[in-house]
Image (cartoon, grey):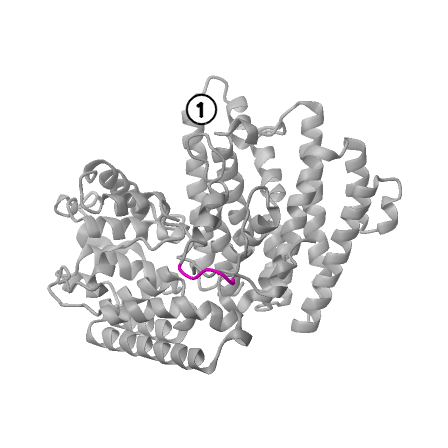
Amino acid sequence: MAPCRLYTLKSPFFLKQISDIPRTNPRGTHFSNSSSMNKAVSIISMQQNFTRSKSTLNDDIHIRHAKELKNVKKIFIEKAKERSVDGLYMIDMIQRLGIEHHFEEEIQEAVRKQYLKIGTHSYYNIDHNLQLSEVALQFRLLRQQLCDIDTGVFGNFMDKKGRLRQKFWGDTEGLIELFEASQLSIEGEDDLHEAGNFTYHLLNSRFHDHHEANVIANTLKYPIHKSLPRWWKELGLAKDFKLARDEPIKWYMWSMACLTDPVFSEERIELTKPLSLVYIIDDIFDVYGSLDELTVFVDAVNRWDLGATEQLPDYLKACFKALYDITNEFSIRVQNKHGWNPIKTLIKSWIRLCNAFLEEAKWLSSGKLPNREEYLENGIVSTGVEVCLVHAFFMLGEGITNETLVLMDGFPPLVSSTSTILRLCHDLEGAKDNDQVGKDGSYLTCYMNDHPGVSEETAREHIKHKISDAWKCLNKECFTPTNPFPSSFAKVCLNAARMVPIMYSYENCSRSRLKEHVKSLLYGDGIREMILQKDQSLVL
């Protein structure tokens, strides 16, 4: 995306250290290797075809891919040995490029050594030459890898009142990294949260004429933790792409966002099926069905009984039949692959969703809106996020235990916080477009109804605070080592939350910019063959 960093590399300052122009970093240590960047990019250009279209490749491509990957890993290890922070710069670059699945062992080892090196906070207290950018990067990457690191590492950069010392206000690189680190704050880390707010306002107000002004603006709008990594240009989309109202592509975009590893081709397609049903059933409740028909439909879902739809119109019969069949087929597939049959949990998630849709239909029919708490409690269910994440959890097949099954039945915080982010962002951004404001209300509308006389600006600020709190909750769930769910599932939840700004990015009262984001993915060199034959069967 040309104007948006959700899909493009941000061109952060550290990338200049591996560009074609040698550069000295703030500590005076030369760190330049243009071949490392070139090799990484060559992996990007080849690896999609390597993993998704093996039948079309010759042996030379396989050999080149293996050699280039080996060379980059060698560079990675050498740089990490020379200076550990350079290893962290490499990790950051690799993650921003979205190719970390090639370097899982190397990343784990580099982070482990860095964590052992810092030991206690005395490391930061003794080495007063550490740069703010380095410490902030260390904090972010170590926390991402579930290392036990707290905000005390920033002590040397704060004054007695806990605010960033004035001497660092002009350190643009340090401010950017501190802002990025603040996005991983959890509940109770008010000092880091406030530091993030301060750096945001500082960068937003003082660096308009800076030579990296565009980088700064993109960072503030799309912090890396809350955005998707750069996607490959050869991403497996339709050969002759026409997005206009092309819902299957929209549904598949969610799957691609949540499951970024190329090995998950089959899983992406399977996840698209329940995703499509969420959208279809939502449309039925919003546009097509009468309240009486919808009540009978939900009763059939609650009973999970095909025979209960006899009195319904054909389109509702067909919808429930599709829901019934797809759910059962999915359960059989999971059981055959992973040894667990998730049918009971899946049915419960669909029952919750359809009952939430029905509640919204009743609000629409009565013309009476609920209070904001009632709306949000129902609204985080009606997003459909729970249904999709439950399917993703079983599809991955990791960490399925009696404990996680019980948690999944009860809408765990890992899922509910992701749902909250989507619901509030949708209501906040969608309200800018009059066509997107449903008569069944929004959190913004309900909040203003509950607080007569409050301005819309005040209500929006309240929603932004709630979104920030939901992100803190999600961070806590993802970065707590005692989290009962596997890291692979936590990553799916994070990526779902990161996808929200694309799906609901309304600017200047215009619709979501999803269309231009997806189309820009196709404007790469040599984009001709985009998708496997099996990926062309996305439509139900």
**Rendered residue at 57%/34% (across/down):** 373
Closer-to-camera residue (457/429): 429
Q: Magenta region's main secondary structure?
A: loop
Magenta stretch: includes residue 528: yes
The local secondary structure at tag 1 comes to helix
Is residue 28 visible to us here?
yes
**Rendered residue at 50%/55% (across/down):** 257
Quadrant position of residue 459:
top left
**Residue 105 spot, x, y in % from top left:** 39, 76
**Residue 312 spot, x, y in % from top left:** 85, 40
Is residue 149 visible to us here?
no
**Rendered residue at 19%/68% (across/down):** 32
In the rendered view, tell whether residue 476 sits above or below residue 163.
below
Is 455 left or right of 332, judged from the image as shown? left
Closer-to-camera residue (47/321): 47
Closer-to-camera residue (313/186): 313
Specify few, some or many for label 1: CA neighbours under 10 Å numbering under 14, 14-19, or 20 or more: few
Badge 1 is on which residue? 456
**Residue 444 spot, x, y in % from top left:** 51, 29
Magenta region: 525-529
**Rendered residue at 54%/22% (across/down):** 449
**Residue 10 spot, x, y in % from top left:** 31, 53
